[in-house]
């Protein structure tokens, strides 16, 4: 609303100046050119003032506009009548320089804000990735957790035909005998061995001492695989039972998992020499 009055004011001033210029005995086209730029600048200030919050910028534009106005007036009045007319060029130049300085500061300030926002976005992205990772991975072994296993089941089972279920033997005893810290190291060691064997993205810790892995091939010899997995933790008398299920498309993840689990239990119970703790 305010800017509408300002436009009317500028256009009225323009009209008055134009009439005065036309009434001069010698019509000076340069004066009309100056009048044109005065009108453009004046209207631009009226338009920009609605959106530009920086008062210094409006002031600098205004100074430039007043310079243009005096420039036009200089062709109508003499400097003796209005001494301020001598300042027209200076006002224009100072206004222009101030506009450049203020614009530079505005851009500099905005860039700082953008950089701050970018680093905040990056920080939040990293946080989101970390939270996402933590929600889907086991804190101790860094393997995918049960939730992640079931979420990725469809994708993995379309790529891999076998699901292997692992459960440690005598782990409770190792925990009791060597301490929880050593128990943790045993779990980490087993998960590292599983990752080496099947790939990090295909192995999951379901919880406690239970793991699963998706495999492209059927292990040629279960005992060889078993020995490889517990190679690094022989001294803790911990063994591993393994159950294998062939993945079929007509079964649900729960059913496949259950089959692998049952096979693991029969492996555990049928092991001829179960790895019992040495006392
Ligand atoms: N150190 C450690 N121990 C854990 C963790 N999660 C579960 N456990 C322990 O793992 C043990 C699992 O016990 P069981 O299921 O009886 O396992 P087990 O002794 O191997 O028994 P079997 O499977 O019958 O041979 C329990 O003592 C739990 O406290 C963990 O994150 N760290």
Image (tube, rainbow, N blue to C red):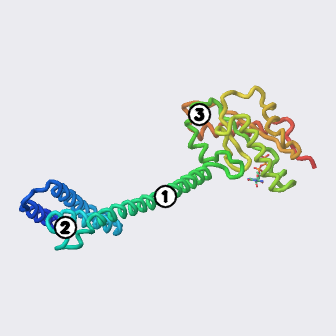
Can residue 48 be seen in the rendering of this structure? yes
**Sequence-wise first label, 3 or 1:** 1
The reply to whether dot 2 and dot 3 touch (C-beta < 8 Å) is no
The quarter of the image holding the N terminus is bottom left
242 displayed left or right of 158: right
Q: Is residue 161 above or below residue 105?
A: above
Residue 117: assigned label: 1
Which mark is in front, 1 or 2?
A: 2
C-alpha distance separating marks 2 and 3? 72 Å
**10 Å crowding of disc 1: few (<14), some (14-19), many (20+):** few
Residue at figure coordinates x 73%, y 28% from the top left? 219
Residue 153 image position (x, y, % from top left):
58, 39
Upstream in sequence: badge 1 or badge 2: 2
Circle 2 sits on which residue? 6
Q: Residue at x 39, y 63 (%)?
A: 102
**Mark 3 and mark 1: Cα distance apart in space:** 42 Å
Q: Nearer the viewer, residue 262 or 141?
A: 141
Q: Mark 2 or mark 3: name the one nearer the start of the chain.
A: 2
Q: Secondary structure at mark 1?
A: helix
Q: Is residue 117 left or right of residue 221?
A: left
Q: Quadrant of residue 149?
A: top right
Quarter assignment of residue 238: top right
* Distance in Å between CA atoms under marks 1 and 2: 37 Å
Tell me the tag on residue 157: 3
């Amino acid at each position: 609303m305010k800017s509408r009055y300002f436009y009317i004011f500028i256009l009225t001033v323009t009209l008055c100046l134009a009439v005065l210029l036309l009434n001069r005995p010698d019509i000076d086209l340069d004066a009309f050119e100056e009048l044109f730029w005065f009108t453009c600048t004046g209207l631009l200030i009226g338009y920009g003032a609605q959106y530009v919050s920086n008062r210094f910028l409006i002031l600098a534009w205004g100074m430039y506009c007043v310079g243009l106005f005096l420039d036009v007036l200089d062709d109508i009045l003499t400097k003796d009548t209005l001494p301020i007319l001598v300042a027209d060029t200076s006002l224009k130049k100072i206004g222009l320089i101030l506009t450049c300085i203020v614009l530079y500061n505005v851009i500099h300030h905005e860039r700082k804000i953008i950089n701050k926002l970018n680093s905040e976005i990056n920080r939040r992205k990293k946080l989101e990735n970390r939270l996402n990772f933590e929600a889907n991975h086991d804190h101790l072994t860094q393997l995918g957790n049960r939730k992640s296993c079931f979420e990725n089941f469809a994708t993995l089972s379309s790529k891999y035909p076998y699901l292997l279920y692992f459960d440690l033997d005598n782990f409770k005893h190792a925990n009791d005998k060597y301490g929880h810290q050593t128990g943790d190291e045993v779990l980490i060691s087993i998960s590292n061995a599983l990752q080496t064997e099947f790939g990090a993205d295909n192995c999951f810790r379901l919880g406690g001492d239970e793991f699963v892995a998706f495999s492209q091939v059927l292990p040629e010899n279960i005992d060889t695989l078993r020995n490889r997995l517990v190679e690094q933790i022989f001294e803790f008398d911990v063994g591993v039972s393994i159950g294998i299920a062939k993945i079929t498309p007509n079964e649900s993840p729960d059913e496949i998992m259950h089959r692998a689990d049952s096979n693991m239990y029969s492996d555990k119970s049928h092991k001829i020499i179960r790895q019992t703790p040495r006392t």
